[in-house]
Image (tube, grey):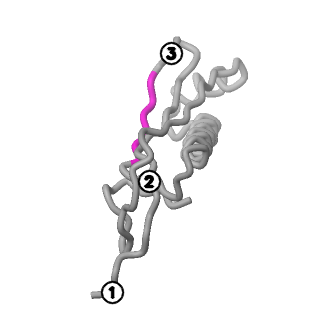
Amino acid sequence: MIIVNTDFVPNQEIKELKGFVRGSTVQSKNVGRDILASLKNIVGGELVDYTKMMDEARQQAIGRMKKHAEEKGADAVINVRLETSSVTNAASEIIAYGTAVTLSKAPEQ
């Protein structure tokens, strides 16, 4: 599955639009991370546990988007975007979305 954030795939022609696809996940904070994050806020620096959690959430959302595209018979997703939103004070949603397409190799020029 090809995933791009552009409206085309280099050296490929879009054969058919399969439609909108998306994948999302909601991640909640945990008390242990919150305590460590509060301490880190005092001295500053990266909140490594949260960075890791959000990276895993992005990968999960992209994986779900890819599965949605595969269910539509697509072999690529173009115009991919990622967004994060707060669901509650203790949870965030990550959503990945784009347009599922099938491709055919572009003719040689």
Span of residues in magenta:
80-85
Mark 3 or mark 2: whose residue is earlier in sequence? 3
Name the foreground residue: 36 vs 69. Answer: 69
Residue 11 on the magenta segment: no
Judged left or right of residue 6, residue 4 is right
Which quarter shows the N terminus?
Answer: bottom right
Which residue in the protein does label 3 denote?
87
Q: Position of residue 56 (x, y in %)?
A: 63, 42
User: Residue 68, position in %: x, y?
Assistant: 57, 41
For marks 3 and 1, the one nearer the N-term is: 3
Q: How many marks?
A: 3
Pointer 1 residue = 108
SS at mark 2 in the image: strand
Measure the C-alpha gap from mark 2 to mark 1: 21 Å
Check disc 3 and report its element: helix, strand or loop: strand
Q: Nearer the viewer, mark 3 or mark 2?
A: 2
**Amino acid type of the residue tagged 3 in the rendering:** Val
Q: Where 52 sits versus 90, above or below?
A: below
| Residue nearer the viewer, 78 or 50 | 78
Amino acid tagged 1: Glu
84 within the magenta span:
yes
* Residue in the picture at 36% in, 71% down: 10
Q: Secondary structure at mark 1?
A: loop
Which residue appears at 55% of the width and 42% of the height?
A: 65
Residue 101 marker: 2
Which quadrant holds the C terminus? bottom left
Q: Please tell me the numbered disc located at residue 17.
A: none
Quarter where residue 107 is shown: bottom left
Measured as percent of width and height from the top left, residue 12 is found at 38, 71
Spot occupied by residue 100 in the image (x, y as percentages of width and height): 45, 48
- Pick the residue in front: 89 or 5: 5
